[in-house]
Structures are given as structure tokens and as C-alpha cells.
Amino acid sequence: MNRRYRKTIIAGNWKMNKTLSETRAFADELKPLLGKPKWCEVVLCVPYVNIPAAVRLFKENRVAIGAENCHFESHGAYTGEVSVEMLKELGVKYVIIGHSERRQYYNETDFTVNKKVHAALEGGLYPIVCVGESLEQRELGVTMDLISYQVKAALAGVPADKMRHVVIAYEPLWAIGTGKTATAEQAGEVCEAIRAVIRKLYGARVARSVTIQYGGSMNAKNAAELLAQPDVDGGLIGGAALKAPDFVEIVNAANQE
Ligand code: 13P
């Protein structure tokens, strides 16, 4: 973390978990434990159907709400899809774009990721852009090349003045939902490389202002060590964000003056 230059952001990604009543129960449990964190931004990215309730329930604790995806078009004949404008009107602030599960199961490509990043920024949402390598790619030694390509493709055409709204999440596929976390050194190394790519594209001032998160089996036990890396500015948390006490412990690890 380096709070001098950029925000620390702890974001939960609920994926396809929690009904409306479970969302309410989570809020009841979370709110007294969480308080109002001062030194980091707390975000919960929840299923579309829970967004209106989540916006209402978490407002007083200053938890920002995010969506887990969006469409790149503003409206039209796209059955089952949700636009940035629809999310914005509900009070959504962040949107996860290009999560590996969407790349793997729903035909998300670097091209659609780029279009969605543009749509989010134009519509006033903060995109959390996910990048990450598979185990095979890591073993082949192409991690940095791949990550650099994914970052460049996602940001193609994004002007420098919009970059302060962009969050990048480094999520190695082999660490997602596996209980296998990247070591702090591995996470720090790739997050540093991501910042170097942004520096080449936009210069040092923009690069140091961008929040870069780590995601992949981050939990209450390993959060502090991961966040101690200078280029790891937060976390994108799956499983551990479904349990209020665990999520709060991760927030506490980040919420240091
Ligand atoms: P886990 O924390 O469950 O590994 O999920 C990480 C993730 O995919 C967050 O987007």
C-alpha cells in the first residue's frame, strides 16, 4: 500500500452468492463490526438483483456498491444484459470488468473488456479491471508478457485524465477459489509490473495514482502480508467476503493510518 499517492480499496466480489434475505442478514452482521473505515475504501460487488438493497443497507457505513459485470452498449436488444446507465441510477460506484470467470465461461475477450472499460468510464462508473495468468502460462514463463498485454488491451484509448477512476485487479487464475494464494512476493512483483506498464503508457504521475489490487484466496490471515507490498493497494476478495467477520478482518488489515 502507499496511501500517499493512491487509495487503498478492499472490494468483495460475491459472485453468484447470497439471496436478498441473505444480503440483509450479512448487513446486520457486518455493520456493527465494520464501523466507518477511514483509511481505506470498502466496496461490495454483489449480484445485480441485490444492488438496490445493498446500496440502501450499507450507506451509513460508507460501503460503496459495485456490480460484477455490465454491457458495453447503452441500451438495445441484448436480452439479459444490464447497462452502465442502469447501474449508475441505482447508486452503483464500481463495476468489475473482465473477471477470469467471465473470460472463461462467457466469452469475455480483451476486446469486450476494452469496450466495457470505455462504457464504464463514460457512464461515470469506476471499472475494476481484472487481469491474470493461468498456471500453464506461469509455468511457461509468460506471466509478465500476458499481463502487460491484458493491461494494454483493456486500457487502449483510455485518456490519461480518466485513469484516476481505473482500478486494476491482479488475479492469478490458479489462486482463485483454490485456497492457494500467491506469495506476497509474487503478488508484489506482478502488481509492480502492472504499474510499470501504466507508467510507460501514461507517465509516472498517473502510474503512482492508480490502485492495483491483488485477488485470489485473500483472507483474514494473509491480507496484512499481501498489503505490505508497496504496489498491492488492496484486495478483490471472493470467498472471504461472504463471511462478515472475515471480511472485516481484511478491511482492518488495510485500514491503517
Ligand atoms: P477467492 O477470494 O474466492 O479466491 O476469489 C477471488 C476472486 O475471484 C475475486 O474476484
Image (cartoon, helix red, strand yellow):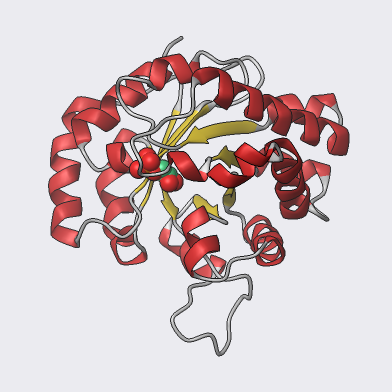
Can you tell me which quadrant of the image ligand 1 is in? Answer: top left
Q: Position of residue 214 (x, y in %)?
A: 51, 32
Q: Is residue 4 above or below residue 152?
A: above
Can residue 237 be seen by looking at this rendering? Answer: yes
Which residue ends up furthest to the bottom in the rendered image?
A: 77
Residue nearest the observer in this picture, 150 or 10: 150
Q: Position of residue 30 (x, y in %)?
A: 20, 35
Q: Position of residue 39 (x, y in %)?
A: 45, 19
| Identity of the residue drawn at 21% across and 35% down | 244
Q: Is residue 121 above or below residue 197?
A: below
| Identity of the residue drawn at 24% across and 29% down | 246
Say left or right for 68 vs 29.
Answer: right
Q: Position of residue 88 (x, y in %)?
A: 50, 61
Say left or right for 218 vs 147.
Answer: left
* Quarter of image, res 111: bottom right
| Identity of the residue drawn at 51% across and 13% down | 228
Can residue 232 be seen by looking at this rendering? Answer: no
Say left or right for 101 vs 117.
Answer: left
| Identity of the residue drawn at 82% across and 42% down | 160
Which residue ends up furthest to the top in the rendered image?
A: 257
